[in-house]
Image (cartoon, helix red, strand yellow):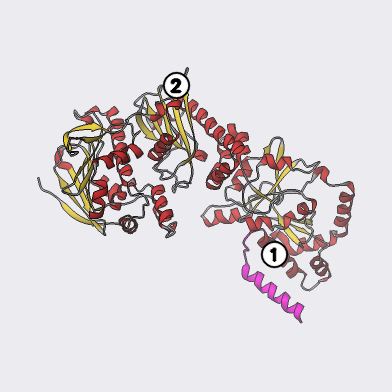
Amino acid sequence: MTTHKETLQFQTEIKQLLHLMIHSLYSNKEIFLRELISNASDACDKLRFEALADPSLMAGDSELNVKVDFNAENGTLTVRDNGIGMNRDEVIANIGTIAKSGTREFFERLSGDQSKDAKLIGQFGVGFYSAFIVADRVTLSTRRAGMEAEHGVRWESEGTGAYTLETVNLPERGTEIVLHLREEERRDFLNAWRLRSIINKYSDHVPLPILMRKTGENQQPGDTWETVNKASALWQRAKSEISDAEYKEFYQYVSHDYGEPLAWTHNRVEGRLEYTSLLYIPGKAPFDLWEPNQSHGIKLYVQRVFIMDDTEHQILPRYLRFVRGVMDSSDLPLNVSREILQGNRIIDQMRAGSIKRVLGLLEEMADKEPEKYQNFWNEFGRVLKEGPGEDFANREQIAKLLRFASTHSDNEIQNVSLTDYIGRMREGQDKIYYITADTFIAAKNSPQLELLRKKGIEVLLLSDRVDEWLTSHLQEFEGKALASVAKGTLDLGSIETEEERKSQEEIEKTAEGLVERIKNALGDRVEAVRVSHRLTSSPACIVLGERDMALYMQQLLKQAGHEVPSTKPTLEINPSHPILARIAKEDARFAEWSSLLLDQAILAEGGQLEDPAGFVARLNQLMLALAS
């Protein structure tokens, strides 16, 4: 057989990553073994699944396992599995490149603090590349199940700028990774007791055997192999038999996360439908939280056989994509496919039950451990805000979990629940008032809040980009309508006195002429001009229609290439303001003053001017006129 060998270059991101690995940013170097065993376990799971449709892939070797071996004389540590293996193209795709857009974000988030960056590396689950924490050369040999021996592939690199790839003859399927340890790492890791303790710590509950050679009387490895982990599906054990430490260890295995979970829920459902779920709330947001297809989420098992990762959110909806864990069904067929999952009655019931458990876990945390829940919200709040638009059936329960900033504290910490807001509502108030803006400062300082602040009415300050979507789907809570103070007319209901209404009517009559002049001057730039009842210290503001999208969102969509229906704002004026009194006396420059008033109101609302140069020119002319 002709051996084809070539040298290829790493992409830039991998060079940076390898540099970090070689310089040992992991505060706990032993984590590399957990990553390699986890990858080996995944490879065995994939083979078991593919073999359901093609049993010949097992080729007489159906006892799937992971072997960990070492050679103290050669300074090598080996991790081998008899799983699915890889062909040449898969090696290049999976080992020679990192096909994750989150990689760039990873490097941007590095702080230079070794202890913090070490945890970040673990959070990003770099897997195979963690071998370079302890090795100065790594050799990977692999053959895909179903291919002949001559189609084996060998990959090797010293962790610098390049790697070699060659075709070799491999009699067995699967993958073998040989780590040539650096001199200073050999004493620590070429030790049977040390390796077993690492496996027990991180991989004890990997649901297939991890084998090591038995040690003889002289403490040297022999020729026979033994299982060194429990090799049991932890989620199938009784909760009373599982310690918190074991739950946390299993979380690290199933999530590829270096940290600890914030909380978890372990449930077994029996009756007409039988399934087990072990679901975790992470302590920190994973790097791929905003990626369309996450690398880790819910793992679906059927009778302890791994079937697939829920990357398409068929088991849990997208707004719960931060949840990690496993679900194991006794009722689904072993040959289940993604197509079969769609609209499947069993999956629908598992999904509904799991959603209730996760939301119930969060409710309990919010009630009994508010500080812990605040930590959760800081990490995942924007994701949970997608819930009311995606999950109508649980909208009220999700709404109770939402947190916002508000004028009650006037800081940007989102810690006000809708229940808190209702408890502080003014007597006679029948609406939950809010405002959306591009930033917290813009929301806090919006002129639309002036009258409500004066009357002591609390307003929710919404500045996350998901908030516009949220408020379009969450229109009431516990019978109280949500109302934007920047859209439509401001109706304070019985909070306003009859005397205040009469005063407003008188102001409107007095300003009728000024309102008409400004409308004529602005023409079709505005939908209407009217006297404002929400302003106390600002000269003007713009107000959108109740169903219109906020100006900053319109601008974002336009920048993204979307077509946005054109909307004209309504200009509200404050006739008692000195600027309006000055404008009313103008004749020659009345149109310029009116345009300036509208442009300022648009800018205050976070909008973008169609003619910024014209705005500057008018402003300069008026300043010169006032100065002369």
Residue stretch rendered in magenta on the structure: 605-628
Q: Report crowding for label 2: few under 14, some 14 to 19, many 20 or more residues within 10 A (C-alpha).
A: some
Q: Is residue 424 left or right of residue 557?
A: right
Query: Residue 538 at what x, y percent from top left?
Result: 76, 62
Q: Report crowding for label 1: few under 14, some 14 to 19, many 20 or more residues within 10 A (C-alpha).
A: some
Q: Amino acid at mark 1?
A: Gln
Quadrant assignment, res 609: bottom right
* Residue denoted by label 1: 600
Query: Residue 413 at what x, y percent from top left?
Result: 62, 51
* Residue denoted by label 2: 274
Query: Residue 507 at what x, y percent from top left?
Result: 87, 57
Q: Which mark's residue is nearer the viewer, 1 or 2? A: 2
Q: In percent of the image, x 26 and y 46: which residue is there? A: 189
232 or 100, nearer to the observer: 232
* Mark positioned earlier in the residue sequence (1 or 2): 2
Residue at disc 2, secondary structure: loop
In this figure, what is the number of numbered marks?
A: 2
Q: Amino acid at mark 2?
A: Glu
Q: Residue furthest top?
A: 272
**If the image is split into quadrants, where does the C terminus sit?**
bottom right
